[in-house]
Amino acid sequence: MNWFTSDLHINHENIIKYCSRPFENVNEMNEEMVRRWNERVTPDDTVYVVGDMFLGKPENAAPIVKRLNGKKVLVLGNHDRSPRTMIECGFQETWQRKNIRLLDDRQALLCHKPLPESTIQHVSLQVHGHRHEGPIVNGKRLNVCVDLWDFRPISEEELCNVKLGDPKPDYVEVEMTGDLVKVTASVRKSDYEGLLDHLQCYTRRLWDNRTET
């Protein structure tokens, strides 16, 4: 079975205050999230973590991450370390973005920050985290942040049963002419970080194409 979650922020003491998490201290938070994860996830399952697994020193987080059941696949968030470090901490795979096909045959894009609607037209929905305060659904974007799901991973069946909203129109166009990259965009202020993520992804593709030639 596949599971989805994000933004555990293991070892992040201040996240308890920032997000009003119901824990007395960071050790209680860590232990409770391990318990709730392993209560649902078996060693044979796969868990997609859509960013921000822990803060602080990797060597302090690794023993906690390795206690979590299942094959752990990380879609990198803004607080995550290098892919090599995250593999050493207990993940089997890391991605900047990942496309998967769900049980109901829809195509989903996994990316930590919610992207402008016009940049995800090629998929049925985006699964993201980053926004601890919600909402769970915004257009065809679905937020799996632990703060919104009782600090547990959600199953693929649960995810597929969430009713999406109507897409909210915006506009993003990126084109390259010679050495110039032209960006034309009109997005909501709340989606500005997602726009920057989209542009960074575009830049990486440009760089990869140039290094291959």
Image (spheres, rainbow, N blue to C red):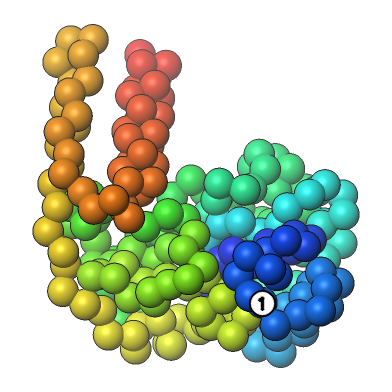
At label 1, counting other C-alpha atoms closer than 10 Å, the crowd grade (few under 14, some 14-19, many 20 or more) is some
Compared to residue 100, the image places residue 40 above or below, namely: below
Q: Position of residue 111 (x, y in %)?
A: 42, 55
Pick the front one: 178 or 213: 178
Q: Residue furthest top?
A: 179
Residue 8 vs residue 159, the one in the foreground: 8
Q: How many marks?
A: 1
Mark 1 highlights which residue? 21
* Spot occupied by residue 70 in the image (x, y as percentages of width and height): 68, 73
- Would you say residue 67 is visible in this rendering? no
**For residue 104, which quarter of the picture?**
bottom left
Q: Is residue 79 above or below residue 106?
A: above
* Residue at 16 percent of width and 64 percent of height: 168
Quarter of the image for the C terminus: give it.
Answer: top left
Secondary structure found at label 1:
loop
> What residue is drawn where x is 23% and y is 53%?
188
Nearest the viewer among 145 and 133 is 133
User: For the residue marked with disc 1, what is the amino acid?
Assistant: Arg
Quarter occupied by the N terminus: bottom right
Res. 15 image quadrant: bottom right
